[in-house]
Amino acid sequence: MKHSHIKFPANNLNFEGILSMPEDLNNHPSIVMCHPHPQNGGNMDNNVISSTALDLCDVGFVTLRFNFRGVGNSEGHFTNGTQEYQEILGALNFVKNLDNTNSDKTSLLGYSFGSRVILSQECVVESIAGIVLISPQTQALIESNVINRTVPILVVTGSNDHVCDSEQLSQFFEGRKEPTTLKIIEGADHFWTGKEIELRDAIRNFMVNLVQ
């Protein structure tokens, strides 16, 4: 695989990201990845985000992980999720216009804060093949209209997550049918300590099945 540091524009600001691409030049599915809360140290190099990006690239996905506004070398200032959706739109536009991606098979992934930004604006999920939400805030998910759309969604959390209440989500999803899937990994906390492999496998299986 090949890795490149890139920049892309969104709403008169420039954002930095890392693009990972398979070696061949086929039309690959792609995924844009949104990191956890920047005020808690979250950025595109977060261990969950970076390891998931590499794993998905290894099975044929073009992956773009980027820094939200005010993080690293991305321009702008943190707005606590109110304006950060704009850079998601910019990242999606960048990926969809690459020569070796299939624009009909572009997905979104968010971890914690990244999930909250995705859930806050339906415009970011227009023409999206699938969504992965890792450890989303409980209320942000329950109150979002995004979760009611027909796009396939994987919600993956741990039974010991202090931010995402797995019992409350189980009740919320009870009786709901696909395309929304809830995956609770026993013993996992919000930071996925010691449970990285189970998380990786859940995401990989969902994404590979999604684009087949």
Image: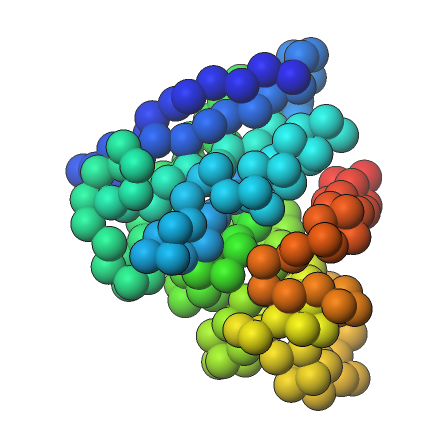
Could you say where residue 188 lies in the image, as x and y percent from the top left? 70, 64
The x, y position of residue 150, in whole percent, is 64, 64
Image position of 34 with respect to 1: above or below: below
- Residue 109 left/right relative to 117: right
**Nearest the eye: 114 or 210:** 114
Spot the residue most to the top: 24
Identify whether 152 is placed above or below 173: above
Q: Which corner quadrant holds the C terminus?
A: top right
Residue at the image position 46 percent from the left and 54 percent from the top? 36
The quarter of the picture where residue 80 lies is: bottom left
**Relative horizontal placement of residue 41, taking residue 170 as reference (left or right):** left
Residue 40 x/y as whole percent? 38, 57
Q: Is residue 131 visible?
A: yes
Where in the figure is residue 110, as x and y percent of width and height? 53, 53
Point 65% across, 17% down: residue: 1
- Check the image and report above or below for 145 versus 15: below
